[in-house]
Image: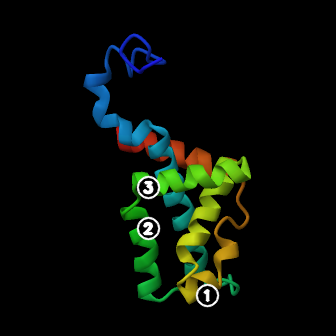
Amino acid sequence: MELSSLTAVSPVDGRYGDKVSALRGIFSEYGLLKFRVQVEVRWLQKLAAHAAIKEVPAFAADAIGYLDAIVASFSEEDAARIKTIERTTNHDVKAVEYFLKEKVAEIPELHAVSEFIHFACTSEDINNLSHALMLKTGA
């Protein structure tokens, strides 16, 4: 079945699709993945900024900038890569973690702490913050 106003899952994407099109980048699966990436990156940055966590030393400015750029430049191609990883992991949040490990693999400072990307988090920790950011951004 081809997507149309009659075959959309809800009237939001169907009948009102033209009125809410600006929200697709926020409330779509792409949007959720983007916010999950943001939450995971910010968590790693917070770990590095906390002096008591010796296993994740403070990041140099270049490393912080690189992580910020992952969030700022998140693309549909990045989202598609996460979905490809998910076909192997069968786990949406784990796929985001693996995606980020790929992204930092060639930066020695970040690669050294890549096992801490999802450290002490549950999927719900990542998801509830991501959904909150979706609502905050879309409001």
Which residue type carries mark 1?
A: Pro
Q: Indicate whether 47 appears above or below 82.
A: below
Question: Residue tagged by mark 1?
Answer: 57
Q: Quadrant of the C terminus?
A: top left
Which residue type carries mark 3?
A: Glu
Looking at the image, residue 94 sits to the left or right of residue 46; the answer is right
**Can residue 45 be seen in this snapshot?**
no
Query: Label 1, label 2: how many angstroms apart (C-alpha)?
Result: 20 Å
**Can residue 18 be seen in this snapshot?**
yes
Q: Indicate whether 16 appears above or below 104.
A: above
Q: Give the number of the disc on residue 77.
A: 3
Question: Residue tagged by mark 2?
Answer: 70
Query: Label 2, label 3: how many angstroms apart (C-alpha)?
Result: 12 Å
Which of disc 3 and disc 2 is earlier in sequence?
2
Q: Give the structural element (helix, strand or loop) at label 2.
A: helix
Query: In the image, residue 26 lies at what x, y percent?
Result: 40, 41
Which tag is nearer the camera, tag 3 or tag 1? 3
Q: Give the number of the disc on residue 115.
A: none
Q: Residue at x 61, y 87 (%)?
A: 57
Which of disc 2 and disc 1 is earlier in sequence?
1
Asked if marks 3 and 1 touch (Cβ < 8 Å), the reply is: no
Q: Residue at x 43, y 55 (%)?
A: 77
Which residue occupies the extreme left position in the image?
19
Front residue of 109/102: it is 102
Which tag is nearer the camera, tag 1 or tag 2? 2
Q: Indicate whether 128 appears above or below 42.
A: above
Q: Residue at x 49, y 18 (%)?
A: 9
Looking at the image, residue 103 sits to the left or right of residue 17; the answer is right
Query: In the image, residue 18 lies at what x, y percent?
Result: 26, 24
* Dot 1 crowding, Cα within 10 Å, few <14, some 14–19, many 20+: some
Which residue occupies the extreme top position in the image?
6
Which residue type carries mark 2?
A: Ile
